[in-house]
């Protein structure tokens, strides 16, 4: 029995798997078990912004694994302290504290709990087509019915207002609202960027009514959009910022940046066995330093502009719109995207859907311009056919 057959036989069944076994990666390339090469525009669904098998990160992980892998936060730890300092240097100065966990969904759960603790309220306003994760609190904030319906009733008090609609948000937020949660760019929901006026008004409305503003940077953080965080494009300062995916260079990690406006976070109100482990912290420190050394935010900006401009030049009637920011790019089609993902794979390019009809590209920011050209050529070929 092959490894692929073994996995298929024994896996949980919750994943719709592609007929491809990946066994190796380097920078923006991955290889399957037969030695076939692919340009990776899936990037671990946004995890691999720094690219695969970065040598500095790999060495940091190995060194830390030989020193101390786990250390619960009931004790202090040198690597954790160093990571907290490193995070403070890349986020807005109004964030003073950080909670460390293991994933983006866990970060969302924590941010929701902190908003409830801070305000004493329990209602949360999320957005239509927003995606925040699949754990029960994060799922309550997620909009897509196919994810929600099997598990209803979900947590009470959650509702959804139209994205980028200031009037609707103004009507939705009241004295019972604990938080408004927004993605700077809706990734899973179709690669829909929030406009600056909407984000600024969300900040004003929440401040006036005593609610927290939570920004979900799980996919948009750590250089993906051309700045360290997606919210940095607007200048808006939220109360809580959820982080994940690219933070650990591929090692599972999440976190929440916490402003001084957030109150009542006291011992035993939340926690995580593995959160802030020395291994994950060492990986994150190395990853952030590599992002700084490689000027990854600028790379994502420049390559994103190049990528989008060349996608817009494709003469294919199937294309309705190209949109995005940095290297979070969506191509909205006039038809379902699934067949074109399969066709791209056959051309050596791995990409993602974003809803039923949006082709999503999330390549590492270390992708080369020659590799982008190959992706453009493959995309033009499959969409023309």
Image (tube, rainbow, N blue to C red):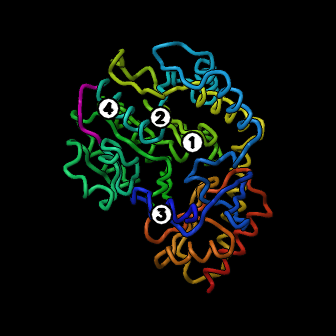
User: Looking at the rendering, which quadrant does residue 108 occupy?
Assistant: top left
What is the CA distance from the residue labelled 2 to the residue labelled 3?
A: 37 Å
Disc 2, disc 4: CB below 8 Å? no
Residue drawn at (38%, 23%), measured in percent from left and top? 262
Disc 1, disc 3: CB below 8 Å? no
User: Vertical placement of 155 versus 161: above or below?
Assistant: above
Which is more foreground, mark 2 or mark 4?
A: 2
Asked which secondary structure carries label 1, the reply is loop
Say which residue label 3 marks: 8
Say which residue label 4 marks: 211
| Percent of width and height locating residue 24 | 69, 55
What is the CA distance from the residue labelled 2 to the residue labelled 1?
A: 10 Å
Tag 1 or tag 2, which sits nearer the N-term? 1
- The residue carrying pointer 4 sits among few (fewer than 14), some (14 to 19) or many (20 or more) residues within 10 Å by Cα, namely many
Tell me how many marks there are: 4
Disc 2, disc 1: CB below 8 Å? yes
Residue drawn at (31%, 51%), measured in percent from left and top? 161
| Percent of width and height locating residue 133 | 40, 47
Which is more foreground, mark 4 or mark 1?
A: 1
Tag 3 or tag 2, which sits nearer the N-term? 3
Quadrant where the C terminus sits is bottom right
Residue 264 lies left or right of residue 321; in this view the side is left
User: Vertical placement of 197 versus 271: above or below?
Assistant: below
Tag 4 or tag 2, which sits nearer the N-term? 4
Quadrant where the N terminus sits is bottom right
Residue 221 badge: 1
């Amino acid at each position: 029995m092959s490894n692929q057959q073994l996995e298929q036989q024994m896996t949980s069944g919750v994943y719709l798997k592609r007929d491809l076994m990946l066994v190796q990666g380097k920078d923006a390339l991955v290889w399957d078990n037969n030695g076939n090469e692919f340009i990776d525009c899936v990037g671990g669904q946004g995890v691999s912004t720094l690219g695969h098998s970065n040598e500095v990160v790999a060495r940091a992980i190995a060194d830390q694994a030989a020193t101390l892998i786990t250390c619960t936060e009931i004790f202090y730890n040198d690597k954790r302290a160093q990571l907290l300092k490193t995070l403070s240097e890349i986020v807005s100065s109004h964030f003073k504290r950080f909670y460390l966990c293991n994933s983006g969904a866990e970060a969302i759960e924590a941010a929701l709990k902190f908003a409830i603790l801070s305000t004493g309220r329990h209602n949360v306003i999320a957005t239509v087509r927003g995606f925040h994760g699949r754990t029960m609190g994060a799922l309550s904030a997620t909009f897509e019915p196919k994810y929600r319906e099997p598990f209803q009733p979900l947590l009470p008090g959650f509702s959804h207002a139209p994205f980028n609609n200031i009037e609707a948000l103004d009507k939705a937020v009241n004295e019972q609202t604990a938080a408004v949660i927004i993605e700077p760019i809706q990734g899973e929901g179709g690669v829909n960027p929030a406009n600056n006026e909407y984000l600024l008004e969300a900040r004003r409305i929440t401040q006036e009514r005593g609610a927290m503003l939570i920004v979900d940077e799980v996919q948009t953080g750590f250089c993906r959009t051309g700045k360290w965080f997606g919210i940095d494009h607007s200048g808006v300062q939220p109360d809580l910022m959820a982080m994940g995916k690219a933070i650990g260079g591929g090692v599972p990690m999440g976190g929440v940046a916490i402003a001084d406006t957030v109150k009542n976070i006291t011992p035993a109100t939340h926690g995580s066995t593995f959160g802030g482990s020395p291994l994950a912290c060492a990986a994150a420190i190395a990853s952030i330093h590599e992002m700084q050394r490689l000027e990854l935010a600028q790379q994502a900006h420049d390559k994103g502009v190049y990528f989008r401009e060349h996608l817009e030049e494709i003469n294919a009637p199937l294309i309705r719109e190209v949109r995005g920011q940095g290297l979070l790019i969506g191509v909205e089609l006039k038809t379902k995207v699934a067949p074109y993902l399969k066709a791209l794979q056959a051309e050596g390019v791995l990409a993602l859907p974003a809803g039923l009809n949006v082709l999503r590209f999330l390549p590492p920011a270390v992708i080369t311009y020659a590799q982008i050209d190959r992706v453009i050529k493959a995309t033009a070929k499959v969409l023309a056919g």
